[in-house]
Amino acid sequence: MATCTMMYGGELAAEIAERVVAAAKGAGLSAAAVNMSDFKKCKLGEEPQTVVFIVQSVENDEPPESAGSCVRFLKRKTNAADMFGKMKYSVLGLGDSNLLLDRQTTTAKDCNKVGQALDKRIAELGGTRMCDMGLADERTGLTEVEPFIEALIPALKEALAA
């Protein structure tokens, strides 16, 4: 059975990744969580893969330290345009609008620049999006996470069955 890899960047992302793995396993799927700092072991783009990226945006719209090397690798201009032609993926961005100056008018979209950039870049490199990107905000209690997981599990079933 094919396995889905939940690649996470950040402490909160690790907790959410474990929740997603548990939900996937509960649905009868094979899933594992991998820290983005270990991205080289996953051999991204070298073989057909199903990957869910769960990444935090920290102050100044930067990835957490554990995700930095993976994000920089994905941003390389020298990556082949079809590098992820065999990848099915989804992205869940985790941010905290409390860290932004204008907290009154900000939303999950405003505090999740890393997740948005990652989603865009993987698509540019030929990845096939399984379900819409999720964007969650700590200030509002991460209420967007459960609906993302509920949409993701059927998409994972379909992707892993193909």
Image: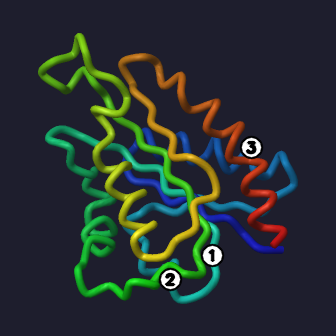
Question: What kind of residue is marked 1?
Answer: Gln
Residue 154, position as x, y percentages in the image: 78, 49
Report the residue at 87% width, 54% height from top: 28
- Which residue is disc 1 drawn over? 49
- Which residue is disc 2 drawn over? 45
Relative side of 127 to 148, left or right: left
Q: Secondary structure at mark 2?
A: loop
Question: What kind of residue is marked 3?
Answer: Ala
Relative side of 50 to 119, left or right: right
| Residue 135 disc label | none
**Residue 105 position (above or below residue 40):** above
Residue 18, position as x, y percentages in the image: 61, 46
Report the residue at 55% width, 56% height from top: 90
**Residue 138 position (above or below residue 23):** above
- Which residue is disc 3 drawn over? 23
Residue 97 falls in image quadrant:
top left
Relative side of 33 to 135, left or right: right
